[in-house]
């Protein structure tokens, strides 16, 4: 029998490589923009059409390529950025594998125009499915323009695998933000079709963050960022974290290491620890945190599409990060002026979340040796001493363990308790709270929030399972939109319809509401819709999930039993049982406390 092993043709090998590197339009955007940055560009323009399906164009004023380099750039493992393996350990460019362009060329149609500053004439190359169709000399600006058209034109299955325009656009923007946030001095323009969506002028980091996220809520963003900064021989950390009162359900949270976006769940916990008890449940703080670290102490040789990065000294950096975040949060809470010469105990504030009725007295343990504002010793951040430095803070964390209501409720196995109760065991206080004696104490439930949680979970489940329950309106309603609200409404319409609304279009900006979600017991939905659109406009990140949750929350809030409504004991028992069947029965979807227990020990203390 003859031998059966042979080398794959380049075009096939490239397509396989592309499967890993290029998964969606956003990955093309990332690779092209990173190349522009590596080429020293100071101005980068991005244009996408049909969420990047039809066209992704990136033009830069970087150093451009020679005729030969332009052709070479599409070969696999062709790169100008490293020469041998040892270069890998001192890498300062974003790319180095030399496979991005080869991969893109395997799965799309590319037109490249490029010219170096001192060349009279530039080069244009057309390449598609790894085949070069033409290479000619052209007049063009100094720099490089890549046009990537009809991504996955030769892979219909991959094309079908792409998500809706909304989702792909969101990915494109996320990639864009991840880069733009690291290079605030570089000017960026982002066009969606002909619309200029983002124009980012050269700025500092703070200015860049505000330019990207402050768009809809300018005033707020300027007030909310606290600077975080810490230097040690191990790592330098700088950036901004949001004040707790600006926390949102969907927050913007970014970590970067040596100019590269990364995901780091462990470091995320370090930041969240600093916010301990400063946030309502379900609230998340914004943060933009940049690490500068010796490239040799992180694993950079990871897969190009992976954003997880391994650090050598993770536990040490965890402590440093958490302390720095606490310091930043402490700084603005300590009443002015901060006296940097003061000796003594640290003043990391422990603020009670508004709705907590914390039963156990808080125990605050701290290391009296540790003084963050002491300028002549530890504050100089001796890296060898980091463990000692932050040891006090770690003990502080442990004391908050038993505070969480969720855990409290979990430990009590309340559902079991409730199921064994008679309806008459339930009673109502102030037409707002349902009370019930359970074996460990007195259980209190806020009726409106409890019902919101039950309905919210139900609506989300129905939407996810594509079950639509609508109720025809006896008198269909007309609703008109301003140009701005019309845009938001069109974004929201598909999700609204999944939730049970039925609309028909009367003219450009007027619609008829024919039916409402069956759960709603109202005769006019105009106000409710207006509120929902408002909510939507205030969202910084318009993911489908968030949109869906907001719609479900609005419907649930509108349909839920109100505060002030008298309930029969059967209704109370029913509500309590249904609540404890929900996965999260401690907090409403917008983070408010639904349930709590007053323990018998506490009650006994009253009768000492
Ligand atoms: P890598 O970035 O890993 O080196 P790529 O496939 O992304 O590999 O690019 C290959 C080479 O093409 C780069 O090393 C660079 O020399 C050149 N190149 C790509 N894009 C540009 C650009 N916008 N300007 C100048 N040179 C570029
Ligand atoms: Mg590259």
Image (spheres, helix red, strand yellow):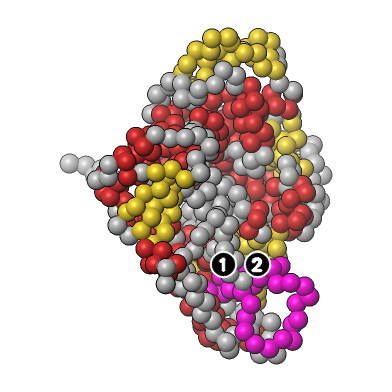
Q: Secondary structure at mark 1?
A: helix
Q: CA distance from mark 2 to mark 1?
A: 8 Å
> Residue visible at 41% across and 64% down?
603
Residue 382 or residue 243, whichever sits in front: 243
Residue 41 horizontal side relative to residue 504, left or right:
right
Residue 517 or residue 100, whichever sits in front: 517
Residue 495 or residue 47, whichever sits in front: 495
The boundaries of the magenta stretch are 319-348
How far across and how far down the image is residue 301, in percent? 49, 62
Q: Is mark 2 within 8 Å of ligand 2?
A: no
> Residue visible at 34% across and 55% down?
410
Reply above or below: 203 against 50: below
The question of residue 330 being in magenta is answered with yes
> Residue visible at 50% across and 12% down?
472
Q: Earlier in the sequence, mark 2 or mark 1?
A: 1
Quarter of image, res 274: bottom right
How far across and how far down the image is residue 327, in percent? 64, 72
Q: Are marks 2 and 1 in contact (CB under 8 Å)?
A: yes
Q: Secondary structure at mark 2?
A: helix
Say whether residue 572 is visible: yes
The question of residue 227 being in magenta is answered with no
Q: Residues within 10 Å of mark 2 (few under 14, many from 20)?
A: many
Say whether residue 97 is visible: no
The residue under label 1 is 274
Reply above or below: 328 against 441: below
Disc number placed over residue 329 in the picture, else none: 2
Residue 236 horizontal side relative to residue 572, left or right:
right
């Amino acid at each position: 029998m003859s031998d059966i092993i042979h080398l794959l043709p380049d075009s096939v090998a490239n397509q396989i490589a592309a499967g890993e590197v290029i998964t969606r339009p956003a990955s093309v955007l990332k690779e092209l923009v990173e190349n522009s940055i590596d080429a020293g560009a100071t101005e980068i323009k991005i244009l996408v059409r049909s969420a990047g399906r039809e066209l992704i164009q990136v033009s830069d004023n970087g150093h451009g390529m020679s005729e030969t380099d332009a052709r070479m750039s599409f070969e696999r493992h062709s790169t100008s950025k490293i020469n041998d393996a040892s270069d890998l350990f001192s890498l300062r460019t974003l790319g180095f594998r030399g496979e991005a362009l080869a991969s893109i060329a395997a799965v799309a149609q590319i037109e490249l125009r490029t010219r170096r500053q001192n060349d009279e004439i530039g080069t244009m190359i057309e390449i598609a499915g790894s085949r070069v169709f033409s290479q000619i000399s052209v007049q063009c600006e100094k720099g490089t323009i890549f046009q990537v058209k009809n991504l996955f034109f030769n892979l219909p299955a991959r094309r079908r695998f792409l998500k809706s325009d909304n989702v792909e656009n969101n990915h494109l923007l996320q990639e864009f933000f991840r880069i733009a946030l690291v290079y605030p001095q570089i000017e960026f323009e982002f066009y969606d079709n002909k619309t200029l969506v983002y124009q980012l002028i050269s700025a500092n980091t703070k200015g860049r963050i505000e330019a990207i996220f402050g768009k809809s809520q300018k005033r707020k963003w300027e007030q909310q960022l606290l600077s975080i900064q810490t230097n040690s021989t191990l790592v330098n950390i700088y950036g901004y974290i949001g004040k707790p009162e600006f926390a949102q359900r969907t927050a913007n949270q970014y970590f970067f290491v040596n100019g590269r976006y990364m995901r780091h769940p462990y470091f995320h916990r370090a930041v969240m620890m600093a916010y301990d008890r400063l946030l309502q449940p379900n609230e998340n703080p914004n943060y933009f945190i940049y690490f500068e670290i010796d490239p040799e102490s992180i694993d950079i040789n990871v897969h190009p599409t992976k954003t997880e990065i391994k650090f050598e000294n993770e536990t040490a950096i965890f402590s440093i990060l958490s302390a720095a975040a606490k310091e930043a949060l402490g700084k603005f809470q300590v009443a002015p002026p901060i006296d940097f010469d003061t000796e003594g105990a640290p003043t990391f504030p422990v603020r009670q979340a508004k709705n907590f009725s914390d039963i156990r007295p808080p125990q605050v343990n701290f290391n009296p040796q540790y003084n963050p504002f002491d300028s002549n010793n530890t504050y100089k951040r001796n890296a060898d001493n980091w463990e000692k430095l932050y040891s006090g803070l770690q003990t502080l964390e442990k004391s908050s363990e038993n505070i969480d209501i969720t855990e409290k409720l979990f430990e009590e196995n309340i559902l079991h308790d409730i199921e064994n109760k008679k309806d008459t065991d339930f009673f109502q206080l102030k037409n707002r709270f349902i009370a019930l004696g359970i074996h460990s104490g007195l259980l209190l439930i806020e009726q409106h929030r409890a019902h919101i949680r039950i309905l919210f979970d139900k609506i989300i489940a129905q939407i996810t399972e594509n079950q639509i329950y609508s109720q025809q309106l006896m008198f269909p309603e007309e609703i008109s939109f301003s140009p701005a609200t019309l845009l938001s409404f069109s974004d929201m319409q598909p999700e609204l319809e999944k939730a049970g609304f039925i609309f028909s279009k009367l003219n450009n900006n007027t619609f008829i509401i024919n039916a409402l979600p069956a759960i709603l017991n109202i005769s006019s939905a105009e106000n409710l819709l207006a509120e929902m659109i408002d909510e939507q406009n205030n969202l910084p990140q318009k993911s489908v999930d968030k949109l869906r949750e907001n719609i479900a929350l609005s419907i649930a809030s509108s349909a839920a039993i109100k505060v002030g409504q008298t309930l029969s004991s059967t209704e109370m028992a029913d509500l309590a049982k249904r609540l404890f069947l929900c996965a999260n029965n401690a907090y409403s979807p917008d983070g408010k406390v639904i349930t709590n227990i007053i323990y018998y020990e506490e009650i006994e203390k009253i009768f000492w």
